[in-house]
Image (spheres, grey):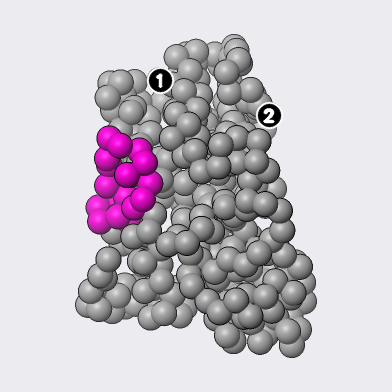
Amino acid sequence: MKVKNEFVKWLIEKENPFPSIFSYMMNEIWTYKEDIKEYYKQGQDMNSFERVLNDSYYELYTELLPRYCVGTDFEINLDEKKLIMMDSMSFREAVLLQKKLEEEGFQTRFSHGFSSIPSDTQYFKSKISYNKENPKKMKINNSEQFMLEGDEDVIWSVYPDSRLENIQEGRTVLGNTKDTYREMENIVMNILKQHENDRFLISSDHGYTKSTGGYQFRANKDDLRRVREVMSGSRYKETEMNDNIGKMVDAGFLVYFNGYAMARGRYTWPIGGKYNVYQHGGVSLMECLTPKIEVMR
């Protein structure tokens, strides 16, 4: 995949490049394909795009993306639309979901938001603000059996994150992205079938990166080993700046922002365990840019 130099220069000149990056991701990379397996292969093009930006637009990962994640609250008026949060849903899944919703007759509008720093669920929850003091909430822990009362304000599904974690630990077929998406799609359609409201916002707390070949930034194994030693195997770490972290920041493997050392872009290193193919907590577009799908019957 080739990204024109003129496009990158144009992005650099913008005060806020993310609407343009979002548009590029939607129109040039994550284009709908009926074959889900072929569709997910476009993640390699996304990796190439991020590699170009990482190499040519230094501030994007070290300053802009972290700053937008820290400074942008997630506000929702529950009188207008109810919130459906799909834990770990990325743009990969959201594009497919929007297509399904439109096929089922729903009107949709696709936009983007931002995760937290680092891109993890517990940090994102503190960013959400509602116009109701005590919104009615429901958490979905079982993808096959759940019953709504129909007037919930906030519905939080642990899927697809739960299935991704199962894949990590070898409890489901490794890399079975088709089943992961279908499970998430079924949950959303079941929620909309049971709920009495006409308007919804479907979103996510963060996305994820894939650490297998073709989906990550290449680097020398010795360099990645040194990063792992500094980060204790995690993609993010709450810590004060020190010489070791500073060296990894200067080398371009880490970002340090707001008291956190985090993986920069698509760099991944061994984190232990057998699989570890899905990761989050760093600073990458697929982790930190979150999908927002407004839905109306």
Q: Please state if 243 lies on the left or on the right of 139 as rendered.
A: right
Q: Quadrant of the C terminus?
A: top left
Q: Disc 1 marks which residue?
A: 198
Q: Nearer the viewer, residue 22 or 214?
A: 214
The residue positioned 66% from the left and 87% from the top of the image is 247
The residue positioned 63% from the left and 45% from the top of the image is 168
Q: Does residue 232 lie above or below 111 as drawn?
A: below
Q: Nearer the viewer, residue 220 or 133?
A: 220
Which numbered tag is attached to residue 134?
2
Q: 10 Å neighbourhood of mark 1: few (<14), some, or many (≥20)? A: few
Q: Please state if 83 lies on the left or on the right of 17 as rendered.
A: right
Q: Does residue 159 lie above or below 245 as drawn?
A: above
Q: Which residues are magenta?
A: 25-42
Residue 131 in sight from this viewpoint: no
Q: Please state if 177 lies on the left or on the right of 4 as rendered.
A: right
Q: Nearer the viewer, residue 228 or 184?
A: 228
Mark 1 or 2 closer to N-term?
Answer: 2
Task: Report the amino acid beneath label 2.
Answer: Asn
Residue 142 position in % (x across, y down): 63, 22
Task: Report the amino acid beneath label 1.
Answer: Asp
Residue 57 position in % (x across, y down): 40, 78
Residue 195 in sight from this viewpoint: yes
Q: 10 Å neighbourhood of mark 2: few (<14), some, or many (≥20)? A: few
